[in-house]
Image (tube, rainbow, N blue to C red):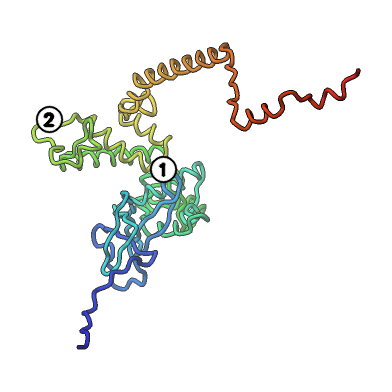
Amino acid sequence: MPRTKASPKKCVKSQVTNNTLLLILKGDALTIPEGCDGKPNMVKLRHPQTSSQAMFFFSADNKMVQEILSFSEDKRSWVIDDHIQSDGKVHLSTPVDPLFLVLPYLMKSAGRFEPLDQLLQDEDFPETKRLLQCISHKQLRHISDVKGDLYDLNHSKHSNLFQSDVGDESYYRFNEDRAIKWLMKKSKKVCDVLKEKGIHVGPGAVSANFIRGSRYVDNDSAPAETEFLLYSYGILSEYISADLGIKLRSALNLPEASNSDAGNPRKRKLDGADGEASKRNKQDSSIEDASQIKASENKPEKVVQKKETAKDKALARAAAGTKSIASFFKKK
């Protein structure tokens, strides 16, 4: 009787191409506008706070930029169609104001006027040139002085002389006062959103945002205005330099942090009471070790006698009554 063949089973492959990842995009980021020749793309840019490499997503027309945030956990993978993706990271996109990405380049050339295309030249991150299409002339006036600005030309007493100096091209120079005012407005807007969404910003906000009971219900449980402002400042400070963050904190009249660990009470506790206890334990342990070493040095060494075997006893009996070979060489 001939054997019937089993129906073929669906095979799940264990690998996919290396460029596969799970990315959750916000909005219509993948939409290609009519008449646009480009396509959405992920590029590497310099992070505005750390100056290190970071991933950003640009729309097809380069009008919108989103930051790519990655979340990773151990022992996690994804099943994508017939494949198993071993990289279990989740990549999320969040819109970011391109002025934050331009701000470090303006600060780097502070004190002099330069055209925007020259300001955004970065040999390490050539895709920075995409920012030229993300920002408008009006947006740049929030953080810089502008030469060649049509508004300034129309309201300048020396507009003819000014126009002859700069021509038709606009030049930009970092203006710290304008930048601080712009950041203060950003902070107030973030505060309004936090209040509208009912986000918990009090103690334990880092973990409380992920539970249902984190939202306040009545005015009695609502955090103070300073807590909202401090929380929004913390969000914005992740996209500006440390020096500019200190000046923004002062402009917002926020309490100064006592040290670098001011926002981490757990770390202060470990460095405080627990730290002192740890130091005492280490000192006691070192004293005890030293006393043991000293006692072992003063104690006389015990002489270990070699146990005589049966073979040694037999040789001793055989050698009884004989002279040592050394006796033949003694002087008579």
* Residue that carries the numbered disc 2 in the rendered image: 221
Q: Residues within 10 Å of mark 2 (few under 14, many from 20)?
A: few
- Nearest the viewer among 6 and 240 is 6
Q: Quadrant of residue 313?
A: top right
Q: Position of residue 74 (x, y in %)?
A: 32, 49
The image shows a total of numbered marks equal to: 2
Q: Position of residue 266 (x, y in %)?
A: 31, 28
Q: The C terminus is located in which quarter? A: top right
- Nearest the viewer among 81 and 214 is 81
Residue most toward the right? Answer: 332
Q: In the rendered structure, which amino acid carries the disc numbered 1? A: Gln
Residue most toward the left? Answer: 218
Q: Earlier in the sequence, mark 2 or mark 1?
A: 1
The CA distance from mark 2 to mark 1 is: 34 Å
Q: Which mark is residue 49?
A: 1
Q: In the image, what residue occupies the spot 86% across and 25% down? A: 328
Q: Secondary structure at mark 2?
A: loop
Q: Position of residue 248 (x, y in %)?
A: 35, 34
Q: In the image, what residue occupies the spot 35% across and 29% down? A: 250
Q: Position of residue 216 (x, y in %)?
A: 12, 35
Q: Residues within 10 Å of mark 1 (few under 14, many from 20)?
A: some
Q: Is residue 307 left or right of residue 25?
A: right
Question: Pointer 2 and pointer 1: residues touching (CB < 8 Å)?
Answer: no
Q: The N terminus is located in which quarter? A: bottom left
Q: Is residue 172 above or below residue 29?
A: above
- Nearest the viewer among 181 and 49 is 49
Q: Is residue 24 left or right of residue 106?
A: left
Q: Which mark is residue 97?
A: none
Q: In the rendered structure, which amino acid carries the disc numbered 2? A: Ser
- Nearest the viewer among 15 and 121 is 15
Q: Quadrant of residue 80?
A: bottom left
Q: Secondary structure at mark 1?
A: loop
